[in-house]
Image (cartoon, helix red, strand yellow):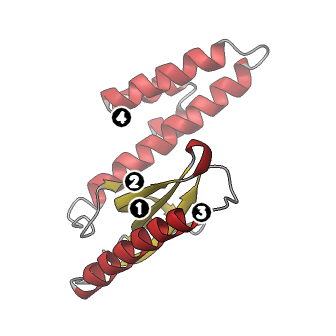
Amino acid sequence: MSAVDNAQTWRDLADQLTPEQIAKMERHERTWASMPDGSEDARTGLLFGARELIGQNLAAAFYQDIPSPGGAETIGPWEPWDDDDDVWARVWEGRSSRVNIAAGNEIEVWVGGIQRGDGRCTRQVSLGAGRGDEQLTAGEARQLADALTEAADELDALNAGADL
């Protein structure tokens, strides 16, 4: 059995985590410590979290030669995908546009997608809204249409230049 399997607490695995990950685990530990009667749940949750981070670190090393998707500005960690440990992928996002609408809310439009472990990418235009269903004025609808058109143009350009 490995150290990952035999660990009793997340700190038993700290040598396999980055300094940033250790700081994150310590923040979680402080939060859990302040919860009443959650000590066993906290220990189990923190140990699970450390094991997940170690898996992401191993995957990052394994997939280090996979180039980032074209147009990616933020890229998530490699993770098991579709409940299948044999398939790994990461989510990425490109440039985004925001359209301010009534009452200080906004709608965000961005190009992003999923990159699989073999380098293939799926690309799509995504929308996010502040509080769910929003009613737009004519001007806001035009701004949203412009943002969507820009995102669609970027998606076409990325797909045209895609290697995989």
Q: How many marks?
A: 4
Q: Which mark is residue 137?
A: 3
Say what secondary structure mark 2 lies in. loop
Residue 156 position (above or below residue 22) = below
Disc on the earlier residue, 4 or 3: 4
The reply to whether residue 47 is visible in this rendering is yes
Say what secondary structure mark 4 lies in. helix
Contact, CB < 8 Å: mark 1 with mark 3? no
Q: What's the distance in space between the residues labelled 1 and 3, CA to CA?
A: 36 Å
Say what secondary structure mark 1 lies in. strand
Q: Which mark is residue 74?
A: none
Contact, CB < 8 Å: mark 4 with mark 2? no
Disc on the earlier residue, 2 or 3: 2
Task: Residue at 39%, 52% (x, y): give it.
Answer: 77
Q: Which mark is residue 90?
A: 1
Q: Nearer the viewer, residue 158 or 153?
A: 153
Task: Residue at 39%, 68% (x, y): give it.
Answer: 111
**Numbered disc in front, either 4 or 1:** 1
Residue 110 position (above or below residue 8) = below
Task: Name the spot of residue 59 as percent of width and height, x first.
Answer: 36, 55
Q: What's the distance in space between the residues labelled 4 and 2, CA to CA?
A: 19 Å
Residue 70 position (above or below residue 105) = below
Q: Which mark is residue 16?
A: 4
Disc on the earlier residue, 2 or 1: 2
Q: What's the distance in space between the residues labelled 4 and 1, CA to CA?
A: 21 Å
Report the amino acid beneath label 2. Answer: Gly
Q: What's the distance in space between the residues labelled 2 and 3, CA to CA?
A: 35 Å
Task: Residue at 71%, 18% (x, y): give it.
Answer: 39
Task: Name the spot of residue 101 as percent of width and height, x first.
Answer: 55, 53
